[in-house]
Image (cartoon, helix red, strand yellow):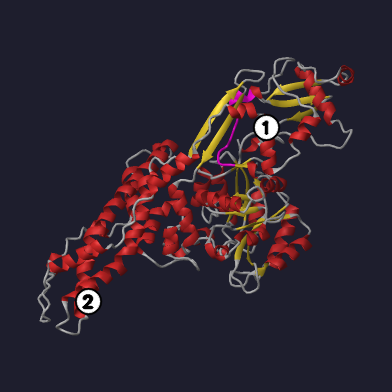
């Protein structure tokens, strides 16, 4: 239930947040949304929310304004879903530059008085701000500091092109230098769009060695209830923190608090975790993840841990005899995460002294990983190595398909093609090409739209199947695989059309156009052949190269392995208590292709479908047959090479 997290200071599984929702009063709201009154709009929100029990916290982030009456109506519903105040600001990073979208979140969760104060400030300071008149980032920060309410900033990154802070970084020699300006206690959250963009942003941060300093988040950015419902039905991320401003800060400073699944401990495994300690009448709940006891010297940290060790049995006598007598004066009882009382000696555990732990955690980064590995070297030695070189070699062999070029032999074939035809003109050329020799065009293949094809398939299939099956995740996964196969087959047929019928017909068309441009009737046949060679080089070589690259990606995408792992078990207090694992994760070929399209393409090149996986078929077609629409400093040649 959504309220489970509210009643406990412990987050027992990943929860869903949507901190980017636009209200009916937002300047970008859809017309049908703007027609709704405040009550109807909030009713619509809760109609969606009640279907998603994992939802813990939301934020209504309108452009440069806050709809205070919407916030008040939301709070009046006394919902277990927390409301974090926020606003999406048009800000410029430098004077005269285009606006970037930056979301500001405020420390006033479910605090009506604080929300009123924030709304008054937002509507006053940002009243004249717009995409064409953005507020300078330095001015915004100073105004926020003057407000005196803690805040966090979440700029768009790898999202919305010019509106993302990263838009101009691609042309810099060292993009990391610019990126680091937006990595601090304010800019701890970067918002991107969808799973592929999340992976892209994380990889970029890893490349500049800052992947542990910034959390990549992705929310619905919804302007209607359908988009909101779609996001909540299949959220790309789950959050392991309490639904509060402090929880948001923790997510921003600890990237491992974000996961792609709920990561809930199965019911049958809860008995393996400590869940509650009652110490001297005080109840302490414990998480199934890492727990930390924090306090000053002499505050009782060691006393609590020693008392827990004795209550569990202390089979290795880690607590000294003199200490035992003192600790035993305190009443201690322990329950597992399932809520069952744990009897002395019935729970296996390890208890390390402070010097051991201090030595283990003294190192950082790779040194820490190596130290940890050395402590458990025997366990890791039992795990066979993953043959990265062999995997890389095989993948290179699969993807390095020969890209066609126009060799001398091929050019001779073009000349031979000219020799086979003659043309009925009074220019004394012994060449004849008849328009009737054009190949018949299959209009359905010639005008094939991948997007429409998928829409037709979806209508034809889903309209005949009960909704309960359509909504089943297994059906969705199978249907996505079915659609992918349709795209691969369709792309193959379209490629065949383009490389045969389309190419020959265009060659004939080019011949007649070139023939018409010949001003001298006695132009030598060799000149005509040369004209054909140049036309072929100019008009088809680059297309054939790009089609070959796209074909390599599509051909090898099915069955492409993205995850390899080897592991071995080791015994502890119980058999097979530890599992040591070595893993290798490889970016999927189509995800890599989409990432490159995001790096290279302007938004308008994606048509109405956007730079996302749902529009991949159209993006591939644009890559193959349209040489325009690239970002500054980039073109199809550099993309093909990469």
- Residue 451 showing in the rendered view: no
- The label on residue 514 is 2
Relative to 304, 547 lies left or right:
left
> Is residue 421 positioned above or below 462 on the image?
below
Residue 357 drawn in magenta: no
Residue 199 in percent (x, y) is at 54, 49
Q: Residue at left 16%, top 79%?
A: 524
Residue 529 in percent (x, y) is at 20, 72
Relative to 207, 280 lies left or right:
right
Which residue range is magenta in the image? 259-270
| Closer-to-camera residue (48/234) | 234
Q: Residue at left 68%, top 43%?
A: 365
| Closer-to-camera residue (68/607) | 607
Q: Residue at left 61%, top 69%?
A: 130
Residue 278's image quarter? top right
Residue 6 in percent (x, y) is at 68, 38
């Amino acid at each position: 239930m959504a309220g489970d997290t509210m009643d406990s200071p412990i987050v027992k599984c990943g929860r869903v947040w949507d901190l980017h929702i636009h209200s009916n009063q937002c300047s970008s709201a859809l017309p049908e949304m703007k027609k709704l009154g405040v009550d109807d709009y909030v009713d619509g929100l809760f109609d969606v929310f009640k279907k998603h029990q994992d939802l813990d916290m939301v934020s209504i982030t309108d452009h440069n304004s806050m709809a205070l009456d919407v916030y008040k109506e939301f709070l009046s519903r006394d919902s277990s879903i927390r409301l974090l105040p926020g606003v999406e600001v048009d800000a410029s990073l430098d004077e005269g530059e285009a606006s970037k979208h930056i979301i500001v979140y405020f420390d006033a969760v479910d605090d009506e008085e604080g929300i009123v104060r924030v709304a008054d400030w937002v509507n006053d300071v940002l009243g004249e701000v717009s995409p064409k008149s953005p507020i300078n980032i330095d001015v915004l920060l100073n105004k926020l500091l003057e407000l005196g309410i803690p805040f966090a900033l979440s700029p768009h990154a790898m999202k919305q092109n010019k509106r993302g802070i990263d838009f101009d970084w691609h042309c810099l020699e060292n993009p990391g230098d610019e990126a680091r300006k937006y990595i601090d206690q304010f800019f701890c959250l970067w918002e991107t769009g969808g799973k592929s963009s999340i992976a892209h942003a994380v990889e970029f941060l890893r490349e500049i060695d800052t992947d542990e300093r910034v959390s990549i988040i992705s929310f619905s950015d919804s302007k209607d209830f359908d988009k909101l419902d779609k996001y909540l039905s299949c959220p790309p991320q789950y959050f392991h923190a309490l639904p509060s401003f402090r929880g948001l800060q923790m997510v921003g400073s600890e990237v491992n608090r974000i996961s792609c699944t709920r990561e809930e401990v199965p019911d049958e495994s809860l008995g393996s975790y400590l869940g509650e300690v009652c110490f001297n009448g005080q109840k302490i709940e414990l998480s199934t993840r890492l727990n930390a006891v924090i306090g000053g010297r002499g505050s009782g940290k060691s006393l609590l841990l020693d008392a827990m060790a004795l209550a569990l049995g202390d089979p290795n006598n880690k607590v000294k005899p003199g200490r035992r007598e003192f600790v035993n004066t305190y009443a201690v009882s322990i329950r597992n995460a399932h809520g069952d009382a744990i009897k002395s000696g019935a729970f296996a555990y390890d208890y390390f002294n402070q010097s051991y732990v201090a030595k283990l955690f003294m190192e950082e980064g790779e040194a820490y990983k190596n130290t940890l590995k050395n402590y458990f070297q025997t366990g890791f030695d039992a795990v066979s190595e993953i043959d990265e070189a062999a995997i890389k070699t095989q993948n290179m062999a699969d993807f390095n398909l020969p890209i066609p070029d126009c060799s001398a032999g091929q050019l001779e074939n073009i000349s031979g093609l000219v020799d086979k035809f003659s043309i009925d003109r009074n220019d004394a050329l012994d060449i004849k090409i008849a328009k009737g020799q054009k190949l018949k065009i299959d209009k359905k293949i010639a005008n094939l739209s991948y997007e429409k094809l998928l829409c037709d398939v979806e209508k034809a299939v889903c309209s005949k199947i009960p909704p309960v099956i359509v909504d089943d995740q297994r059906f969705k996964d199978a249907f996505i695989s079915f659609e992918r196969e349709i795209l691969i087959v369709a792309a193959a047929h379209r490629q065949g059309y383009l490389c045969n019928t389309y190419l020959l017909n265009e060659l004939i068309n080019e011949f007649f156009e070139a023939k018409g441009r010949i001003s001298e009737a006695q132009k030598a046949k060799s000149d005509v052949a040369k004209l054909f060679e140049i036309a072929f080089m100019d008009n088809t070589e680059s297309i054939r190269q790009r089609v070959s690259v796209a074909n390599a990606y599509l051909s090898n995408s099915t069955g492409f392995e993205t995850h390899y792992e080897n592991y071995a078990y080791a015994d502890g207090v119980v058999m097979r208590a530890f599992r040591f694992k070595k893993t290798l994760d490889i970016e999927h070929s189509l995800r890599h292709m989409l990432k490159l399209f995001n790096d290279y393409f302007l938004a308008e090149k994606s048509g109405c479908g956007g730079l996302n996986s749902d529009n991949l078929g159209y993006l591939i077609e644009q890559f193959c047959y349209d040489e325009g629409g690239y970002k500054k400093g980039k073109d199809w040649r550099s993309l093909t090479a990469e």
